[in-house]
Image (cartoon, helix red, strand yellow):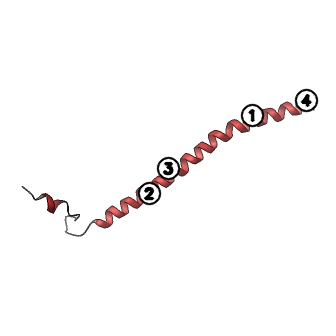
């Protein structure tokens, strides 16, 4: 049975240290989280702006009919 400590020391099959990979994966996770946050903010802005724009257009049309 293999020794569990030797299997979890963060080395690849060739024996090279693989700690850079976990750092890279962490950086990529952060990058995609930032993209997700920007996309959510954009979607929220769009979902809030569209109804306000519609209401404003209706209001301006009503004012134009009165004048």
* Mark pair 3, 4: CA separation: 45 Å
In the image, residue 63 sits, relative to residue 45, either above or below, namely above
Side of 34 where 7 appears, left or right: left
The single residue placed furthest to the right in the displayed view is 67
Residue picked out by circle 1? 55
The answer to whether marks 1 and 2 mark residues whose Cβ atoms lie closer than 8 Å is no
User: Looking at the rendering, in which quadrant would you find the N terminus?
Assistant: bottom left
SS class, disc 1: helix
> Residue 45 got which mark?
none
The single residue placed furthest to the left in the displayed view is 1
- Residue sitting at x 83%, y 33%: 61
SS class, disc 4: helix
The answer to whether marks 3 and 4 mark residues whose Cβ atoms lie closer than 8 Å is no
Indicate which disc, 3 or 1, sits on the residue closer to the N terminus: 3
* Mark pair 3, 1: CA separation: 29 Å
Indicate which disc, 1 or 4, sits on the residue closer to the N terminus: 1
Q: How far from the left and from the top, in percent, is residue 20?
A: 32, 67
Q: Local crowd at mark 3 within 10 Å, few (<14), some, or many (≥20)? A: few
Indicate which disc, 4 or 2, sits on the residue closer to the N terminus: 2
The single residue placed furthest to the bottom in the displayed view is 16
Indicate which disc, 1 or 2, sits on the residue closer to the N terminus: 2
In the image, residue 66 sits, relative to residue 49, either above or below, namely above
Side of 52 where 26 appears, left or right: left
Residue picked out by circle 4? 66
- Residue sitting at x 73%, y 39%: 53
* Mark pair 4, 2: CA separation: 54 Å
Residue picked out by circle 2? 30
The answer to whether marks 1 and 4 mark residues whose Cβ atoms lie closer than 8 Å is no
User: Looking at the rendering, in which quadrant would you find the C terminus?
Assistant: top right
> Residue 36 got which mark?
3
Q: Local crowd at mark 4 within 10 Å, few (<14), some, or many (≥20)? A: few
SS class, disc 3: helix
């Amino acid at each position: 049975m293999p020794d569990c400590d030797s299997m979890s020391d963060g080395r690849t099959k060739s024996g090279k240290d693989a700690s850079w990979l976990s750092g890279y994966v962490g950086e990529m996770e952060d990058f995609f989280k930032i993209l997700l946050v920007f996309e959510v903010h954009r979607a929220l802005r769009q979902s809030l702006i569209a109804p306000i724009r519609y209401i404003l257009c209706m209001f301006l049309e009503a004012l134009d009919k009165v004048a």
